[in-house]
Image (cartoon, helix red, strand yellow):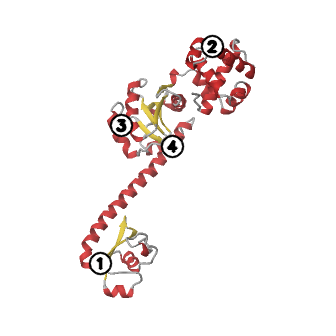
Amino acid sequence: TDTEGMIRASTDPTRIGEFHEGALLAIQEKKAIHMSEEKVKTLRGVRFGIVIPLFMHGKPQGVIGITGIPEVVAPYAHLLQKVTELFIQDNAYREEQERLARELELFVFDWLHTKAWDQDLKERAAFFQIDMYSYQQVLVFKSIQEPFKVLYSDFKAVMKQWGAFDDALLIRWGQEKLLVFIPTRIQDIKKQDVESLRKILKRFTKGELVVGVGQAVNPEHIQVSYQQAERASAAAASGKEIVFEKDLQFDIIQFALSDETKQEFIQRTIQPICNDDVLLKTLRVWFESNLSYKETAKILHIHINTLHYRLKKIEELTSLNLKNTHHLVMLYISFLFLYEDTKKIWL
């Protein structure tokens, strides 16, 4: 029952929702009570057996009871009491850990979005025993399609198994991301170390796992490394599993521009052929073949004259001359923006 004596769970479904006066009495008197023949006759909703109140830190949590001859079922009831109290304590501990985890995530959010570290932020860091001056680099691990099934209680084992940087800081970031703060005692983290951690964390998600690696910065500018890692993880989602921000080129432009700007650029360039899968596929293969007519025709299994016809049609519909470098670059950029926006693969 709950603390008001209402039956919330029972092996006899017909009793759920009924009032058990003996349970309420056990809560009030803070002791186990045998439901004797006299109590069965005088108390509401009781049967022969025993009821035992459950307490945690002096506060009532509910009552468990077993029907039967009181003297016979009493040992089983007391054993059940101990097991149930352990479950309650474990659940309370997990809830407290999750509460602290949420507070930690809120602190990290402020840490990464505050330009100046004020006294309040430093005090919150001290509460979590985090030295903000000890971290210079951020990694963003992103699970594609499936969330992470990882608890903060798992982090210590993960760091121990990784072994590379046992003093790194691992933070949950929503359901699909994990942040890793790398300490200042090293140079830029090596790819093999990132891959090692990626393989360990892969056990906690069924989705594809990619990583963006920000550059090492002055600890007071850690938000820069975080932003770089986010940018790199977005690029990683497009193909490579591990991407270092310092290796990005065109992706920097893609990340910097707003979605509205990209959409407007698409409207002004490639929009007329956006619904023509044949022309889009032709354009994709042509770009991937470095503008080789022969190679493109071979891959598409078409005659080269057919390829010329399709490219001519693209020129007519978009008003872009593929022999004009300026027009060609605009078409290529708009194609990349379109691919990023729709995540569509033209087979």
Nearer the observer, disc 2 or disc 3?
2
Q: Earlier in the sequence, mark 2 or mark 1?
A: 1
The residue that mark 1 highlights is 68
Nearer the observer, disc 2 or disc 4?
2
The disc placed on residue 159 is 3
Instruction: Classify 86 as above or below 292.
Output: below
The residue that mark 2 highlights is 304
Nearer the observer, disc 2 or disc 1?
2
Q: Earlier in the sequence, mark 4 or mark 3?
A: 3
Residue at mark 2 to residue at mark 3: CA–CA distance: 56 Å
Examine the rendering and report whether any part of residue 265 can be seen: no
Q: Earlier in the sequence, mark 2 or mark 4?
A: 4
Residue at mark 2 to residue at mark 4: CA–CA distance: 50 Å
Residue at mark 2 to residue at mark 1: CA–CA distance: 89 Å
Q: Give the amino acid type for the residue marked by disc 2 in the picture.
A: Ile
Residue 240 screen position, x and y as percent: 48, 26
Residue at mark 4 to residue at mark 3: CA–CA distance: 20 Å
Q: Give the amino acid type for the residue marked by disc 4 in the picture.
A: Gly
Q: Give the amino acid type for the residue marked by disc 3 in the picture.
A: Met
For the residues bearing labels 2 and 4, Cβ distance under 8 angstroms: no
Look at the numbered disc 3 and give the secondary structure of its residue: helix
Nearer the observer, disc 4 or disc 3?
4
Residue at mark 3 to residue at mark 1: CA–CA distance: 51 Å
Q: Residue at x 41, y 77 (%)?
A: 24
Nearer the observer, disc 1 or disc 4?
1
